[in-house]
Image (spheres, grey):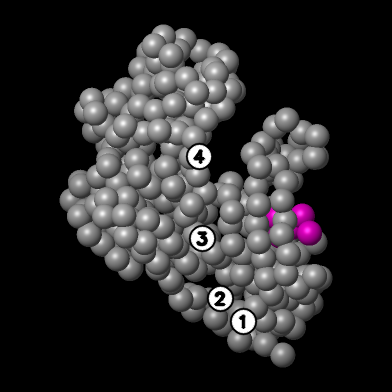
């Protein structure tokens, strides 16, 4: 996060730094610390957040740019989720972090309706409890996430130091991420950039949307895309994320008239392709987190990882190849 100065964990369990910009306390602190806004709100309610030497009493309180902050992150509570011996495709692992190639259909962390069978359940077994606790009781080790029905790469923090370092890179957008997707139609131009604030849709609060240019809601989002291969009625595209917002690729592709095939929320698959998707049993958004690159949060070494397309997307591409 540009402008923030982290001093690490000089006091065990305490995150310190300076705020990048003036804003609501929860927004400014989430951006500066890498913690989620909901986590910040919880810690404010518990009296564990101070800005400019004063305890923050309200998530909506205004805070100023350049103010010093201190966030006391309590030890994680015992996790209700149980370790489960679920197979994981581990692309890389050391004592600080792990890179997982998540299959489509796997939820990242427990929530209502998905208390087990999640990536967290699998990680608790695989890592035998050695996961970062910064994100609280239900999300140990989880620095970022991808949708249940999106496949591909996730980085998992095994220590708080690794979590803090990775969170800083996600916040300042220095992590390289690319997705491969199959979208409806043929984008014109074949390559370009989609930008605009993404926030909750006014028409449907369960969906995200590109908001009007004058909107004060949402978060700035930028996706760079290029056409990799023209297919029959669709195209294989690569999307590189400059930011990482909820459903960003899905929302941006839909906003330019090229929703992802199989996406049940942000667009309808062209009628001509629906029989094919039923025939091959393709029932998810055609989206795969294909590459991930960042500075190792402990060694400082630049690391790059790739995950090959899963079998269902390969079959979809094969069946639509001209």
Q: Gap in Å between the C-alphas at discs 4 and 1?
A: 40 Å
2 or 4: tag closer to the N-terminus: 4
Q: Which residue is mark 1?
A: 317
Q: Are marks 2 and 1 in contact (CB under 8 Å)?
A: yes
Which range of residues does the magenta coloring cover? 252-256
Q: How far apart, in angstroms, are the residues tagged by discs 1 and 3?
A: 22 Å
Spatial CA distance of label 2 from label 1 is 6 Å
- Tell me which corner region of the image, top left, top right, bottom left or bottom right, holds residue 89: bottom left
Question: Mark 2 — residue?
Answer: 313
Nearest to N terminus: mark 3 or mark 4: 4
Residue 197 position, x and y percent, is 70, 42
From the viewer's perspective, is 89 left or right of 181?
A: left
* Above or below for 117 versus 184: above
User: Neighbour class for label 1 at 10 Å: few (<14), some, many (≥20)?
Assistant: many
Instruction: Please give the residue where the numbered disc 3 appears in the rendered image.
Output: 177
Image spot of residue 256 (x, y percent) = 78, 59
User: Does residue 111 appear in this view?
Assistant: yes
């Amino acid at each position: 996060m540009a402008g923030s100065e982290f001093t690490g964990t000089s006091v065990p369990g305490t995150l310190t730094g300076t705020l990048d910009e003036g804003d609501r306390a929860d927004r400014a602190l989430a951006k500066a610390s890498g913690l989620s806004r909901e986590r910040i709100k919880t810690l404010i309610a518990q009296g564990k957040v101070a800005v400019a030497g004063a305890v923050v009493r309200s998530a909506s309180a205004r805070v100023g740019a350049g103010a010093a902050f201190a966030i006391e992150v309590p030890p994680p509570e015992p996790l209700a989720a149980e370790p489960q011996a679920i197979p994981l495709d581990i692309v890389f692992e050391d004592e600080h972090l792990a890179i997982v190639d998540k299959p489509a259909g796997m939820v990242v962390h427990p929530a209502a309706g998905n208390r087990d069978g999640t990536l967290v359940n699998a990680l608790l077994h695989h890592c035998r409890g050695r996961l970062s606790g910064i994100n609280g009781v239900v999300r140990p080790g989880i620095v970022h996430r991808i949708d249940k029905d999106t496949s591909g790469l996730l980085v998992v923090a095994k220590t708080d130091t690794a979590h803090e370092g990775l969170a800083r890179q996600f916040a300042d957008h220095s992590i390289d991420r690319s997705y491969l997707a199959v979208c409806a139609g043929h984008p014109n131009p074949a390559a370009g950039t989609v930008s605009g604030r993404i926030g909750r849709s006014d028409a449907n609060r369960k969906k995200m949307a590109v908001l009007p240019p004058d909107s004060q809601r949402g978060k700035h989002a930028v996706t760079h895309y290029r056409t990799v291969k023209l297919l029959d009625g669709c195209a294989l595209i690569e999307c590189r994320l400059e930011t990482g917002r909820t459903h960003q690729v899905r929302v941006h592709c839909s906003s330019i008239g090229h929703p992802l095939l199989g996406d049940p929320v942000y667009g309808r698959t062209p009628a001509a392709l629906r029989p094919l998707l039923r025939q091959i049993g393709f029932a998810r958004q055609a989206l795969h987190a294909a590459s991930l690159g960042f500075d190792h949060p402990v060694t400082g070494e630049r690391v790059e990882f790739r995950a090959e397309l899963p079998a269902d997307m390969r079959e979809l591409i094969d069946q639509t190849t001209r």
